[in-house]
Amino acid sequence: MREEIAAESIALPLRSASPNGAAAAPGAGRTTRLAARLRSALPPAVAFLVVIGGWELFCRLAGMKPYLLPKPSDIVAAASANASNLWVSVYTTMSEAVLGFLLSVLLGVGLAIALASSKLVERSIYPYAIVMQTIPIVAIAPIIVIWFGAGMNAIVIIAFLIGFFPMLSNTLIGLNSTDHNMKNLFHLYNASPLQTMFRLRLPAALPFIVAGLKISCTLAVIGAIVGEYIAGIGGGKGGLGYAITVAAARLQTAYLFACGLAASLLGIAFFLLVSRLSKWLLSSWHESELNSSEG
Amino acid sequence: MEAMASTKEWVRMDSVSKVYPNGTTALQEVDLSVREGEFLCFVGPSGCGKSTVFKLITGLSGATGGTLEVMGTSPQQARKQSDTAFVFQDHTLLPWSSVVDNVSLPLALRGMSRKQRREEAEQALELVGLKDYVKAMPRQLSGGMKMRVSIARALVSKPKLLLMDEPFGALDEITRQTLQLELLDIWSRNKEMTVLFVTHNVFEAVFLSTRVVVMTPRPGKVAATIDVPVPFPRDASFRTTPRFGELVRSVSEALKH
Ligand SMILES: Nc1ncnc2c1ncn2[C@@H]1O[C@H](COP(=O)(O)OP(=O)(O)OP(=O)(O)O)[C@@H](O)[C@H]1O
Ligand SMILES: [Mg+2]
């Protein structure tokens, strides 16, 4: 497991540095592993080129109007022509999503701990927490805009709300799924409720919390973009959602595609980052995740 | 042994009954007296209330009739004094904590300093022969080793009363016999420790104990108590003596009632 990570972190710079051939020093084992990696990356790369090439060819041959379906080359051109705007949009959306996500993790886990500490409080609030999870946040987003005004605040709150309930209910379920014998053990050794919470229930809930993290990080990006549709402000620092609405209104389809692509990449990158983090959290704490990666 | 008036009575049950809320009578009119330094084995078929006896002694649940005293006070009070320790059939180790952290858990819960509890934990691990596995994680250990860690965790608080509910039930016969010998060795080095040990296994009961309590089900009752007046240290050869055979036979006989 640890070896693999080490090999990967070496393989990554290797791959990017390979054109100038400077980083060819590592042992033969690593080179073969790199070769295997390249070989497994080859089919998807070919498929990608075929699809993109086919798309380009189709547009040229069929004479597609660029505002209906732009060619890949149009998209690249639109992206590079507006590179600085696009980057600002990505950066804005990313900050909103990350902020919203962090808030939903902190408050979701925190509130779950508070709720789970008292059976009575939990029993009275839990049903609402579950029901709230099913509220389409998009439907109440305009209210949030009314309360907090258009702009960053409202968007972050929408991104937060959308990821908050999955975090809360996942953590709550995890905190309540502690093994009965373990709970007896802590009870018999006169553990205080606080000790039971932080030494037993919270670590035991970690796989559930991690599952919540993965859901919430994807939702936070969606929440940020949706928030920008409704509450986005321009003035040179609008996010992707705002850029998308503007591009759509002006029929700048190529740029619209570029924005959509950027949003997808942002979502994927965020998810991969959180997955990595989750894996690390679990492997150092818990055996369930290790079993799957060792086996 | 019973004649020694000076030995303290660690557990006293006077016609103790336990009826669970769903109406199951788990124990009926159980009388039992456990003295300091005994190694008492409870044998009986599944469902005869052995675990229930333990739940009452630890104060996990309350008796519904009769009186029960542990170390001269109520079970809850006795547990608060931290003189009692437990080993379950399941090793109940925390999978995210290292062996030494698992063993020192009872001390950590009591607020002992990290350095001190580490020392104590290492001593306890030495007793069960796992001194080299201090930093290992539970997942790296075999079933028998996990059980040893679990026993070390019980020993770390230097209990006066050790309750073991089928600790070797999930182990294979060879590991089981090794651990029996180790347990006896640990106990004979500290004769003040009183051990209450639940098992399904008549051979195990006779091999380990100074006294066997035979229980019968529906409702749970003490059918007989059989003394095992065989001196310690006992080793594996005890299993092959005629005396062992006789005792096993009389326990099995009592089980049939
Ligand atoms: N929490 C409970 N609620 C209701 N009935 C219970 C409960 N715990 C145990 N019982 C019942 O009490 C009886 C004795 O149970 P107990 O667990 O003490 O048996 P045991 O001798 O330990 O059995 P085993 O050897 O299988 O562990 C059984 O009939 C069981 O169904
Ligand atoms: Mg039992």
Image: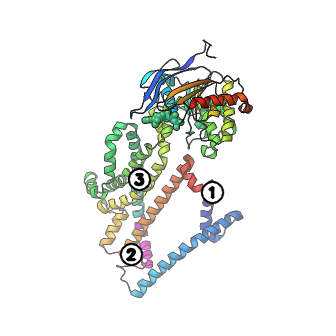
- The residue that label 1 is drawn on is A6
As drawn, the label of residue A101 is 3
Residue A90 vs residue B74, the one in the foreground:
B74
Q: Which residue is mark 2?
A: A254
Residue B104 spot, x, y in % from top left:
59, 33
Q: Is residue A121 above or below residue A173?
A: above
Q: How is the image coloured?
A: rainbow
Q: Position of residue B201 (x, y in %)?
A: 61, 35
Nearest to the observer: residue A187 or residue A236: A187
Image quadrant for the N terminus of chain B? top right
Dot in front, 2 or 1: 1
Secondary structure under tag 3 reads helix
In this rendering, does residue B213 appear at all? yes
Instruction: Give the x, y percent position of residue B105.
Output: 56, 34
Tell me which chain the residue with mark 1 is part of.
Answer: A
> Does the magenta-highlighted stretch encompass residue B22?
no
The residue under label 1 is which amino acid type?
Ala
Could you tell me how many numbered marks the image carries? 3
Location of the C terminus of chain B by quadrant is top right
* Residue depicted at 66% across the width and 69% down the height: A21
Q: Main secondary structure of the magenta part?
A: helix
Which residue type does callout 3 highlight? Phe
- Quick one: label 2 or label 1, which is nearer the N terminus? 1
Span of residues in magenta? A64-87
